Each structure stands twice: as structure tokens, then as C-alpha cells.
Amino acid sequence: MKLHFIDTGYFYADGGAMFGAIPKTAWQRRYPCNESNACILAMRSALFVVDDRIILIDTGAGDKHLKQLSYYKFFDLKDLGEELQKLGYTCEQVTDVVLTHLHFDHCGYSTIKNKESGKLSAAFPNAKYWVSRSQWDNFNHPNALEKDSYFTENMQAVADADLLHLLDTDTFICPEIELRIYDGHTAGQLVPYLQMPERTVVFAGDVIPLAASVSPEWISAYDTNPVISYNEKIRMLDEAANERQALVFCHDAYTKMALVKSVGRFFKPVAL
């Protein structure tokens, strides 16, 4: 059993958007920003290898829409296929791709473009791509707040190749990984729970994207339903604190993973 983290690159996001109603005087003490209030965010993927399964969680932004998304000022981008090779694996060996949700920064490398023909194909041709049904429906019929975060080119070739597997409920895709559904940030976000020998590791996705976001009220303005986000965070944090689960923060450029401690209804990250 092996767990690797791959930072596929970084981008800038407005601190006010990341922390919503929380004033800058509060959030800047927990997460740095530049003179324009822009925060550096990571795009973190995970590779979980257990028995004969090679499972990739999220794929970063890829490189197909960088000009359209120039506002985010992407930098230090990595080719995910090359990063897998450094770990001793090929894209063809990946058996499962778990996409927490289908915003561009989480699924962009799900498809790749042939440099000569321009044709799009699934980047992991032998893998099952796991997505919740409600997120897939949202992707195909996006609401006004999310429509600019979805690109058909990131997923259509996967669907055309019949590699897409839609989930309606919490599901174990193997004995060591349960995929649970969380709403709030977007419809039907999948959160992988990895059963490691020493503890359960939770790839929190955009339910709790930063260590600074552990406080339940610190909800991103990108979340489409903040009240649901609050309740879903409490659900995740209560279990994480009680069971000493480790949370992986997919966008935190400074803290990859931490335990959680609760003091009443207050939560804080604790270093492993």
C-alpha cells in the first residue's frame, strides 16, 4: 500500500473569494496573500496504490484552457503523466480515476489533446473514471454560478469512451477506499476515505480546501450553498477529530495534511 501526493501546479485566487464573509484582518493571519489580496493555491492530486489497483485522485487543470483562465496566473505546472512516470507508473496502468468534482482545476488532465491531430482522448485509457451522478448532471446543465468552471473538453472524451462510472450513494470501490458524497461547494462532490494501516486519510477536496478553512464558518464564496457547506464541514470534522483521521488539503500551498482537534464547536488543524 502506497500513497503519493502530486502537486500538479499552482495558481492565484482572490483571498476574499477563498474566505467569503471572513474579513481579511482575520484570514490573513492564517493564510498569506500578496499586495493584491491574491493567495497561492496548489492543485494537489493523490496516487493510492493498493494490491493491483492504481488509483488517481483528481488530475489538476491540465493545459487545454490556460489562455481562457489567464486570470488565475497558473505557474509551475507539471505534466501529470510525466509525474506518474517519476513514481514508476504509466497512464495506461492507472485502474481508477476519482474526480472529486468537475471544476477545471480538478479534472483538466482527465483528457489530453493529440498535438498533431488535435483530437481529444482519455488520458487514462484503461481506468474507470468515478464521478457522482449529481455532479455529472450539474456539469452538463450548470447553474449560473458554476458554468465558467466547467469545460466539456475535459470530460466528453471520457464519456464517449464509456469510461465514466456514476455514483448515486457512498460506495467502496475497493476494501481500502470509500467514496462519500458531500454537497455545498458543488453538487455531489466525492470525498475519498483511504483506509491506511496507521489511520484513515481523507482527501477533503473543496469541502475543506485549506488548513485555514477548518473553521466551519470559514466558507469560500465559490461554494454554491454555504449553509449546506457548513453542515457538511461539521459532519466531516466531527468524525475526523473523534477518529483521528488525517485530512488532505487539496489547495493548500503550505500544509498538505493534518489531524484535526476539536474544542467545543471550534476545530483547528494539528500537525502529524
Image: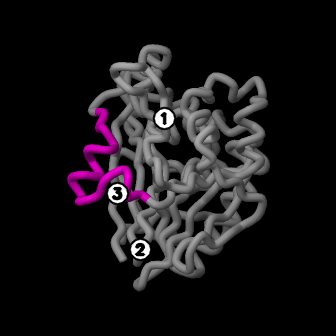
Q: Is residue 20 left or right of residue 115?
A: right
Q: Residues within 10 Å of mark 2 (few under 14, many from 20)?
A: few
Residue type indicated by callout 1: Ser
Q: Nearer the viewer, residue 167 or 192?
A: 167
Residue 148 position, x and y percent, is: 63, 22
Q: Nearer the viewer, mark 2 or mark 3?
A: 2
Residue 262 position, x and y percent, is: 58, 71
Question: What residue is shown at x 41% (from left), y 48% (from top)?
Answer: 44
Q: Which residue is mark 1?
A: 121
**Sequence-wise, which precedes: disc 3 or disc 1?**
3
Q: Secondary structure at mark 1?
A: strand
Q: Which mark is residue 147?
A: none
Q: Residues within 10 Å of mark 3 (few under 14, many from 20)?
A: some
- Above or below, 217 relative to 106: below
Q: Nearer the viewer, residue 132 or 72?
A: 132
Residue type indicated by callout 3: Phe
Question: What residue is shown at x 34% (from left), y 22% (from top)?
Answer: 115
Residue type indicated by callout 2: Asp
**Residue 23 shows up from this direction:** no
Bounds of the magenta segment: 77-94
**Residue 199 shows up from this direction:** yes
Question: What residue is shown at x 23% (from left), y 60% (from top)?
Answer: 88
Q: Which residue is mark 2?
A: 52
Q: Secondary structure at mark 3?
A: strand
**Sequence-wise, which precedes: disc 2 or disc 1?**
2
Q: Which residue is mark 3?
A: 5
Cα distance in 3D space between marks 3 and 1: 25 Å
